[in-house]
Amino acid sequence: MIDKSFRLDYGSCLGLLRERLAEPAPGLLQLLSGPRQVGKTTLLLELERELGEQAIYAAADGPEALLPGFWERLWQRAATRAKNQGRSVVLLDEVQRVADWSSRLKSEWDRIRRKRLPVHVVATGSSALQLAGGSRESLAGRFENMTLVHWSAAALVDVFGLSAEEAVEEVVRRGAYPGAVALRHDEARCTAYVRDAIVEPAIGRDLMALSRVRRPALLRQVFALAASAPSEVVSLQKLQGQLQDRGALETIASYLQLLEEAYLVAALRKVARQPTRRRASPPKLVPLSNALCAAVDPRGPPDPRMEPDRHGRWVENACIAFAWNAGQHPSYWRERSFEVDVVLDGSWGAWAIEIKTGAFRSADLLGLFEFVNREPAYQPLLLCDPSRLAAADRLGIATQSWQDFLLHGPPAGTG
């Protein structure tokens, strides 16, 4: 399972690593995982520039890592640098590419601790599942884990200087992979980048390497169907019926869990008082970046004027994915004709949220009112277009534009 409490954006992750590397060495190993192409390598290179001669950057997926003695030379350099500079910091990228990496890292770390060498270690991995499995098996008690998640609209504003309006549109239409920002005006190139640099390596290389994946074609189909159904409640039976490779329901459910652990698609559970009903309910599928939807759907991003319903789904998906990436615990609620788009628990507070694009009536919010009547611990929140805020305010509940939500999260002090 994913530890939601240590999901961090780029700036927060960099700040936390700076703090931990300022502590006396040797400290605990710092393991940084996350989706592909969200800036893990960039973060290590930024730390290398800041630390100067104390830093040693090594890429385990680079050509030098294939040379005999790579591993031994790395740690000898770290020991020598620590002696000459007072400490050293090993920045090891894509550590899971090293054969038997967790056992070998444990051996080196134990030696560093035993000799009291002033050496810090930060290791990253794009294959979060391999990184998590190896750390649990061999590095128990020796590491701290953190996750660099998909970028938010606010991060695009801070790092790339996009206007708030541009950043929100980018998150909804094409996601927020930093490498795709420069390609955002070329739809074809942007889609090709996401498909070739993110989707194919994540599924074709990272997930397929796991022993749990015995039916690769089925996994690909499950991902494609999930990415083409953003923010939709889809029963496993319906998924099974649409798949060309008819897998058992248990296999499909396990592959959805794998996709979530790989930071690709979250399968939200229904809010239910009885655990058996919660487990039996169909999941709500949420691709964790709208870039994945754009890469899979041949229609590309929706046109808000020509495809208002489809655009509404993508807005809803972007809002829920933003909450998931921010470490919140999203779920959904549906009871007969009543429905709530997303129910949030976490550091933001307890919220029941309905997301509306375009015109709406008070009757469209009956599910929201019914839920908070049954569950008074949750604060109702309506997300809508900016032009609808005045009308929404008259309903007597908290309101916010979905654009503002994607930039800042829910209103402060009322959750």
Image: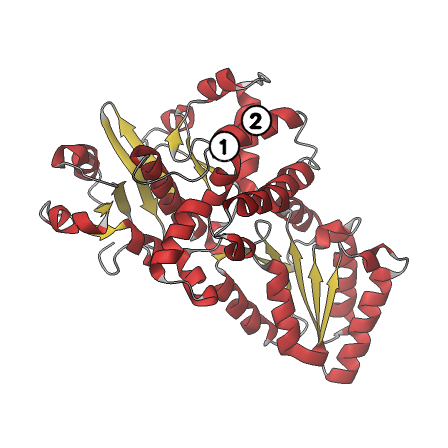
Going by the image, does 312 lie left or right of 86? Answer: left
Dot 2 or dot 1, earlier in sequence = 2
At label 2, which amino acid type do we have? Answer: Gln
From the viewer's side, name the closer residue of 210 and 407: 407
Q: Nearer the viewer, residue 367 or 288?
A: 288
The correct choice, above or below, for 159 with respect to 236 in the image is below
Instruction: Give residue 48's position: percent from left, percent from top.
Output: 66, 72
Q: Residue at x 52, y 46 (%)?
A: 2
Residue that label 2 marks: 221
Disc 2 secondary structure class: helix
Image x and y of residue 250, in percent: 55, 22
x and y percentages locating residue 172 in the rendered image: 39, 46
Q: Is residue 138 above or below residue 243?
A: below
- Examine the image and state in which quarter residue 279 appears: top left
Kindly tell me whether residue 211 is visible in this rendering.
yes
Query: How far apart are the alpha carbons under marks 2 and 1?
Result: 15 Å
| Mark carried by residue 197 | none
Which residue is pictured at 33% across the width and 34% down the height?
A: 307
Q: Amino acid at mark 1?
A: Pro
Residue in the image at 59% along x and 75% along y: 23
Q: Is residue 18 above or below residue 276?
A: below
Reply above or below: 414 against 278: below
Task: Say few, some or many: other residues with alpha carbon within 10 Å of mark 2 (under 14 / 14 to 19 / 20 or more).
Answer: some
Badge 1 is on which residue? 298
Percent position (x, y) of residue 282?
Answer: 40, 25
Crowd rating for badge 1 (residues with CA inside 10 Å; few <14, some 14–19, many 20+) = few
Residue 306 sits in quarter: top left
Number of numbered discs on residues: 2
Label 1, secondary structure: give it: loop
Q: Are marks 2 and 1 in contact (CB under 8 Å)?
A: no
Q: Is residue 184 left or right of residue 172?
A: right
Q: Residue at x 75, y 58 (%)?
A: 105
